[in-house]
Image (cartoon, coloured by chain):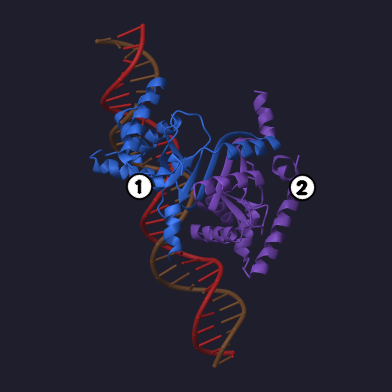
Chain colours: A purple, B blue, C red, D brown
Amino acid sequence: MSANALPYRPHNHSACVHQALSEARTVCASRQARLTPIRERVLELIWQSHKPLGAYDLLAVLAEDGHNAAPPTVYRALDFLQQNGLVHRIASLNAFTGCTHAGENHTCLFLICRACRNVLELTAPDVTRALSDVSAAEAFTPEETTIEVAGLCPSCKESDDHD
Amino acid sequence: MSANALPYRPHNHSACVHQALSEARTVCASRQARLTPIRERVLELIWQSHKPLGAYDLLAVLAEDGHNAAPPTVYRALDFLQQNGLVHRIASLNAFTGCTHAGENHTCLFLICRACRNVLELTAPDVTRALSDVSAAEAFTPEETTIEVAGLCPSCKESDDHD
DNA sequence: GAACGAGATGTTATAATGTTTCAAATCTTG
DNA sequence: CAAGATTTGAAACATTATAACATCTCGTTC
């Protein structure tokens, strides 16, 4: 199984978080984008797991932090993080997940487990190429691509089979 | 250009609507699903153009009809239509569009013009296969697939180039 | 170091999208 | 026609997202 499949397996997750934050600092520094405390905190929260969080989930945690934030605070942080390629919005869930390819310009896809809610982000050249061909065939100029596959991850499939 | 590319070109749209409604009746009859007046009206409204409509857009038109509907009325109609493969929800737009492959079991993708807002629905075996391969490689069991490509359609690209 | 300006954040209000719940009406089937 | 199932009506509410404007922070310039 590829290293990318981690979210579906137990792993040293604090390493994920640490690496993500570290990469984020690098990316922001190189772009002269300011990774302020709020933005960094939101990114850290999103990376707490591989389950996408909603904006209001984030707000709730910030409230526990003692930070009395309003929705725009979170949405602005999320906008910043998206613009700098640090998080993705999962349209079918209205939720946000950490980008595992920070800084890379990429078309990615998501495998979303409906049972455990974990999300695996992948880049799939074959899919990207096929989609690009389809667009070209229709003379369509693609700009933003959303590919989200909902289903069951291997672990949850197994549990499901035992029912 | 394929016949499927119609939304981006002038065409006899009332034929689209007529055919869609006719197919819907056939599909529902064969499934013993009841295409009630509200459901049919919602489907007809969705087919008024190839631009996806939001649930509240539909509500507004129903209000003009003199039909004083509340949100659940529309969402229930939309649920029914989706379940019977007559409309699709475009997750990235929170909007609904008529299915051009009614009754067929298919994985489709959408080319969404950000300028004119028209949407072209396609089935792309190469994309479907590539996605299926990716899922298999991760031992993931896919159930629902969302593929939405936002960009510029040929007509709008042309206008854009002239700026 | 004071004044300025740009970017970031705070605050309030509101918009847009979607769901829950229960009651009433309608259709279907025996 | 009576009973049960499906559909619709209606009110309230939940969730997600944005608009508008005030304030703060921090680096730059004078």
Q: Which mark is residue A12?
A: 2
Residue lying at 53% horizontally and 35% vertically, measured from the top left: B107
The reply, left or right, for residue A155 in relation to residue C4 is right
Image coords of residue B157 (percent x, y)? 45, 57
**How far apart are the two marked residues, 2 and 1, measured between alpha carbons?**
57 Å
- Which residue is nearer to you in this view: B69 or B101? B101
Which one is in front, A90 or B10? B10
- The amino acid on which the numbered mark 1 sits, given as a three-letter code, is Pro
Residue A68 seen from this side: no
Q: Is residue C27 left or right of residue A50?
A: left
Q: Are marks 2 and 1 in contact (CB under 8 Å)?
A: no
Relative vertical location of residue B28 with respect to residue B90 in this rendering, above or below: above
**In this rendering, which labeled residue sits more in front, label 2 or label 1?**
1
Q: Residue at x 46, y 48 (%)?
A: B112
- Residue B33 sits above or below residue B108 on the image: above
| Chain for disc number 1 | B
The amino acid type of the residue labelled 2 equals Asn
Instruction: Look at mark 1 in the image and give the residue it sits on.
Output: B10
**Picture quadrant where residue B52 is located:** top left
User: At numbered mark 1, what does the secondary structure look like: helix, strand or loop?
Assistant: loop
Q: Residues within 10 Å of mark 1 (few under 14, many from 20)?
A: few
Q: Quadrant of residue B23?
A: top left
User: Is residue B80 visible in the rendered structure shown here?
Assistant: yes
Taking depth in this image into account, of C24 and A65 the one nearest to the observer is C24
Residue drawn at point x = 57 percent, y = 43 percent: A148
Q: Position of residue B19 (x, y in %)?
A: 35, 32
Which part of the image, by quadrant, shows the N terminus of chain A? Answer: top right
Q: Is residue B54 left or right of residue A25?
A: left
